[in-house]
Amino acid sequence: MKALQDLDIVVLTARLGSLSAAARQLDLTPAATSAALKRVENELGVALFVRSTRSLKLTDEGERFLSHCSEALALLKSGAEAVRSNQSQFAGPLRLSLPSDLGRRTLLPWLDQFLEQHPQLTLQLQLSDRLSDLYQTGSDLSLRYGEPEDSNLVALPLAPNNRRVLVASPAYIGRYGEPDHPARLSDHNCLCFHLDAYRHDRWAFSRNGESLTVKVKGDRSADDGEAVHRWALAGQGIAYKSRLDVADDLAAGRLNVVCSDWMGEAAPLNLICADRRQLSARIQSLRAFLAERCEQQLARSYRHER
């Protein structure tokens, strides 16, 4: 259906800001995408984009058309999926954006299991702690801690009760001891996460109605959660991690919880999408699968906590 492909090209070009980038993602020639855009503009009788030497920018008419176009395409794709057989609902691509640490250590094997159950699915991953723009990256879904800043996005809970936890390796504790109160973290090397100009060095805790925020410092920080995790395992300091990230290490004794009578801040894990109409049978199945694995993972970590 050529008209639908033309609309897809318009939407993707708007998201990427480039006809050539849209052509690469759709495996088309730049000439084909340019021709599609001209067909739509001629049909409407308006210019949808202002062209420069480096990028395209939507006109006011283009902005208005895009919102209707995206909605219409979502409805058409939803209708097409509804008429397929139940088996075909579990075919096609899963394009996911995952946080670095949880993605590599935990989610990758889980997703392998999910694909074994549904061999007609394909998987395309983006692994990064940077908050991905679902409209720019080509990902359909994102797994992220916390609520999305964009209120237009839909956040479906996978691990709503997950929290951050202070952890250190037995080797570190054996060498330096462990703090008996979060305020004592100033006496320890704390492994920090940073992203761009933001450094996560104020760690929050609560106990019996009391709240406490501690400013920490240390000789290492990284913009990659997996790097912080590895430093903790290597005995380089104390880390403040999502319990899901370190659940396997807690269960195996590679890391221990310190200040266990204090709760870290909430870190709910959500499956995020741009529109509820994206929630096809395969996405709902993936959500249920991951939520069950998260619950089991957290339960194991508590059972083995010393």
Image: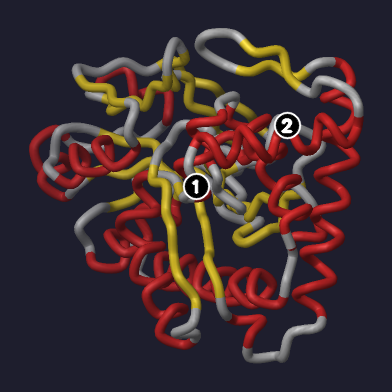
Which mark, residue 38?
2
Q: Which of marks 2 and 1 precedes in the sequence?
A: 1
As measured in the structure, the alpha-carbon distance from the residue carrying label 1 to the one carrying label 2 is 15 Å
Q: Quadrant of residue 150?
A: top right
Task: Give x and y (percent) for residue 97.
Answer: 49, 48
Amino acid of disc 1: Leu
Amino acid of disc 2: Lys
Task: Give x and y (percent) for residue 264.
Answer: 52, 40
Q: Are marks 1 and 2 in contact (CB under 8 Å)?
A: no
Determine the residue positioned at 27% across, 36% down.
Answer: 228
Q: Secondary structure at mark 2?
A: helix
Which mark, residue 28?
1
Residue 259 can be seen in this image: no
Task: Give x and y (percent) for residue 22.
Answer: 54, 38
Residue 210 can be seen in this image: yes
- Within 10 Å of the Cα at label 1, are there few (<14), some (14-19), or many (20+) other Cα atoms? some
